Every structure is written in C-alpha cells, then in structure tokens.
Amino acid sequence: GSSAVGTFNAQTDGGATGTGRADQVLQTLAYIDFLPERWKVNPFNLNIQLQKGQPIPGVDGVNYQYAIGLSAVLDSREDYALGVAYNLATVDELDNPAVRAAGIKGDAEALVVGARWFDDKSYIGFAVARLRNHETTDEGTYFDGWGSELYARYRLIKNYWLVGGYNWLTPDENEVQAGQYELLYGVVGLRYSIDEFNRLAYAEWRIDSTSTQSGDDIGNNFTIGIRWDF
C-alpha cells in the first residue's frame, strides 16, 4: 500500500517533499564495498538528494524552501535487507495564515526504518515511520504521527501465492486538528503467477477500519485484477 510510511504523502505522489516520485532533484547514489567478504552482503548503498522550492501540497502560494533526503540500504546476497531513510523539507513561512490553517507547525520530516526477509517460497517486509508535518487527513489537514506497514507473501503450491499485510497511520494524541482521522486496513489475497510477478492474476480483500477526520468509515473493498507486462 505504501500509504502509511510517508512515501506518497499529503494525497500526492510524494514529489514535493522528495519521498515518492521526487520532482526536480539533484541526486547521487554511491555503492561502498567495505564489509568483509564473510558477511555475504552487497556493497553498501547510500543515496543523497537535494531539492528546492517545491509547492507545499494543499497550501496555495507557499513553497518549501529546500529539501534534503538521505537513505541507506544494507542488502545481503542471500535473504535479508535493512534500510533507513530520512527526508527534511523546510518551511520558512510558519506565520502565514494559510500555513497555520493547514495545521503545519514546522518543517516536514519523515524518518523510515525498514527490513525484509525472503527466500524462494516466502517474503516478509516491515517498515515503521515517524512523520512530522508531512501527512494529511482526508480533508488535507497536516499532523504529526506514526506509521507502519507490513507485507507478506507465501507460495502455496506451484504458481499460487497467498498475500497479506496492513497499513496503519495514526496522529499523535495531541494533534486535535486531525479530528478522528486514523488510517488502518489489512489486505488478504490470492495470486496466480503466470510469469513470476510480470504476468499474474489476483483477487484481494481489503478489510478497512480507516476513520476520516470527521469520523466516517471508509468501507471494505474486493478487487479482481490482471497484471500483464510486455
């Protein structure tokens, strides 16, 4: 889902703050091979990106001053990976009435720590995030909060996979401007792979306990789909 750990924040593609599909960034990626061979890990992956002057989502006429992003991944040659990412987008117009009305009280910050484990039959990934002035409710109100995401899949027989997971994003208790907003849903499904994960058919049930800012329920969803890469 990636809807609880700050990737596509404020109901956007994550371009303005650089956490998702980053807009107009200068980025460098370094692979550093410094660990002993016996550790059986790939070269250390370090990414740095710089960004300037993107519009603040939902706040007309106000831009972030600049944004910086850092991420690092330690990836084994066998079955696990660990990663951490931090992004900061500065706000220098905190006295602007439009900024205050949106609930923004400081710079936008997103810190994410994640891990995954996998083999030929199974995969499990987990991430937890601390988010400040970065996420919004369904009505566009910014808040500070915590998010977490779990994704798992398991091969039942041959080409059939069982998949599941959840997304959970909750504002801090003192974020009264967020109302009753809380994002919480779980997903369970069955996938048939024709060509690994390039061509497949799937059916998924999303069990949704999300509450909007005004306290309304979202409702569950059942999806049947086909993915076919050429």
Image (spheres, rainbow, N blue to C red):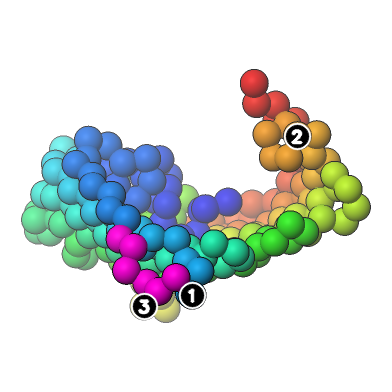
Amino acid carrying label 1: it is Arg
Q: Quadrant of residue 15?
A: top left
Instruction: State the separation of the CA atoms marked 3 and 1.
Output: 48 Å
Where residue 160 appears, as percent x and y from the top left, is: 86, 47
- Counting residues from the start of the chain, the first of labels 3 and 1 encountered is 1
* Label 2, label 1: how far apart the Cα atoms are: 34 Å
Q: Residue at x 16, y 38 (%)?
A: 61
Q: Residues within 10 Å of mark 1 (few under 14, many from 20)?
A: few
Give the SS element for disc 1: helix
Q: Which residue is mark 2?
A: 195
Above or below — where is 134 with respect to 190? below
The answer to whether the residue labelled 3 contacts the one labelled 1, judged by CB atoms less than 8 Å apart, is: no
Q: Quadrant of residue 168?
A: bottom right
Camera sees residue 230: yes
**Residue type highlighted by circle 3:** Asn
What range of the chain is rendered magenta?
Answer: 32-37
Instruction: For marks 2 and 1, give the one nearer the viewer.
Output: 1
Q: Find residue 110 and report its horizontal and vertical position in percent.
A: 33, 63
Tell which circle, 2 or 1, labels the residue nearer the N-terminal end. Answer: 1
Residue placed most toward the observer, 43 or 176: 43
Q: Position of residue 105 (x, y in %)?
A: 21, 65
Residue with the mark numbered 1: 38
Label 3 to label 2, Cα distance in Å? 49 Å
By secondary structure, the bulk of the magenta-drawn segment is best described as loop
Q: Which residue is mark 3?
A: 174
Label 3 or label 2, whichever comes before in sequence order: 3
**Going 27% across and 43% down the picture, which residue do you hit?**
16
Q: Which mark is residue 187?
A: none
Above or below, 177 against 1 in this view is below
SS for tag 3? Answer: loop
